Image (spheres, rainbow, N blue to C red):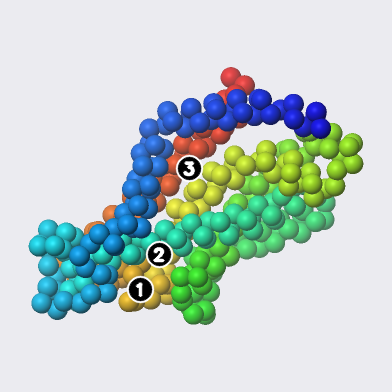
């Protein structure tokens, strides 16, 4: 018991140092502020706007931004772009978040088992990962999306099934570097089971790379959802997403460019913000800095 609790104070100290390093990362703080703002806007915004995302007003077709109560203009059916953008943001952000959770869980499970067990178990699991990675992920994604009925839940599952391999490789490499450390050897000497050592001792010490990878996975999932929805295989109208808003705007680039610029800007802000957060977490959780 004493052997495993002795590291509690140093761990808290390292966590405090990581938090301070993250707070000094200006781009990461900017990204965090933008994600909080986007999330609050998508959750609360539709209730504050005078129009619903599905309200059609043919007399207000193609109204430019800042026209009356249409702050971001209207689309070809007279629907309020701001209402649709925020409702689409709910769907795109939720798809990105839950796809990240599922892909991180799958990749972490595979990576921990492969990295700790090694031998034929690890080799089989990692060759399976290599087999999935040998297929271009975007073609695999489109094939699954075309074969299955598109819905937010199904799109989330499809993105998860095509995104867990990178997490598995990161976790497997990290676990391999930890499995011969002193605390793991002490656990074996105490007779702890392999499952206990993997998930109660090694996994908490590998959380840094997992957190960074999961943050970047959110950004990738948002892009993937936008991509397949833009091609018509993802979220289907009238349910809005940033991707299918771009799909509906492509034929009006000359006459109503705001229809493409606004959802494109939302995708750019969300993806860039998550990447900034990932960069900040990577720098903050870099244990090498603790030894400098």
Residue at figure coordinates x 66%, y 25% from the top left = 9
Tag in front: 2 or 3: 2
Residue at figure coordinates x 73%, y 47% from the top left = 199
Q: Quadrant of residue 210?
A: top right
Q: Farthest residue toward the front?
A: 47
Q: Is residue 53 left or right of residue 174?
A: left
Q: Label 3, on which residue?
A: 278
Q: Is residue 169 above or below residue 133?
A: above
Q: Is residue 222 above or below residue 214?
A: below
| One can see residue 265 in this view | yes
| One can see residue 224 in this view | no
Q: Is residue 2 left or right of residue 128?
A: right
> Of label 2 and label 1, which has the lower sequence position?
2
Specify the label residue 91 is tagged with: 2
Q: Quadrant of residue 183?
A: top right
> Of label 2 and label 3, which has the lower sequence position?
2
Q: Farthest residue toward the top?
A: 292
Label pair 1/3, CB-CB below 8 angstroms: no
Label pair 2/1, CB-CB below 8 angstroms: yes
Residue at figure coordinates x 16%, y 76% from the top left = 57
Q: Is residue 75 left or right of residue 139?
A: left
Q: Label 1, on which residue?
A: 239
Rate crowding at label 2 as few (under 14), some (14 to 19) or many (20 or more) other CA atoms within 10 Å.
Answer: many
């Amino acid at each position: 018991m004493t052997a495993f609790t002795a590291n509690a104070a140093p761990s808290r100290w390292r966590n405090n140092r990581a938090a301070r390093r993250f707070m000094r990362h200006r781009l990461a703080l900017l990204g965090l502020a933008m994600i909080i703002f986007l999330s609050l806007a998508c959750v609360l915004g539709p209730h504050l706007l005078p129009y619903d995302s599905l309200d059609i007003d043919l007399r207000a077709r193609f109204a430019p931004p800042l026209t009356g109560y249409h702050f971001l203009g209207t689309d070809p059916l007279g629907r309020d772009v701001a209402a649709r953008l925020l409702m689409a943001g709910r769907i795109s952000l939720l798809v990105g978040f839950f796809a990240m959770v599922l892909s991180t869980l799958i990749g972490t499970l595979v990576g921990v088992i492969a990295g700790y067990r090694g031998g034929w178990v690890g080799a089989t699991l990692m060759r399976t990962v290599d087999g999935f990675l040998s297929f271009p992920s975007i073609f695999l994604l489109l094939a699954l999306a075309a074969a299955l009925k598109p819905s937010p839940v199904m799109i989330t599952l499809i993105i998860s099934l095509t995104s867990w391999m990178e997490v598995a490789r990161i976790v497997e490499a990290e676990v391999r570097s930890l499995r011969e450390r002193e605390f793991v050897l002490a656990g074996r000497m105490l007779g702890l089971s392999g499952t206990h050592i993997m998930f109660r001792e090694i996994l908490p010490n590998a959380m840094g790379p997992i957190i960074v990878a999961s943050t970047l996975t959110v950004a990738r999932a948002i892009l993937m959802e936008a991509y397949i929805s833009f091609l018509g295989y993802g979220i289907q109208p009238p349910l809005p997403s940033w991707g299918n808003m771009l799909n509906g705007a492509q034929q009006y680039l000359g006459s109503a460019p705001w229809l493409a610029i606004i959802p494109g800007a939302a995708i750019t802000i969300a993806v860039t913000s998550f990447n900034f957060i990932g960069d900040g977490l990577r720098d903050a959780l870099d244990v090498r800095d603790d030894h400098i």
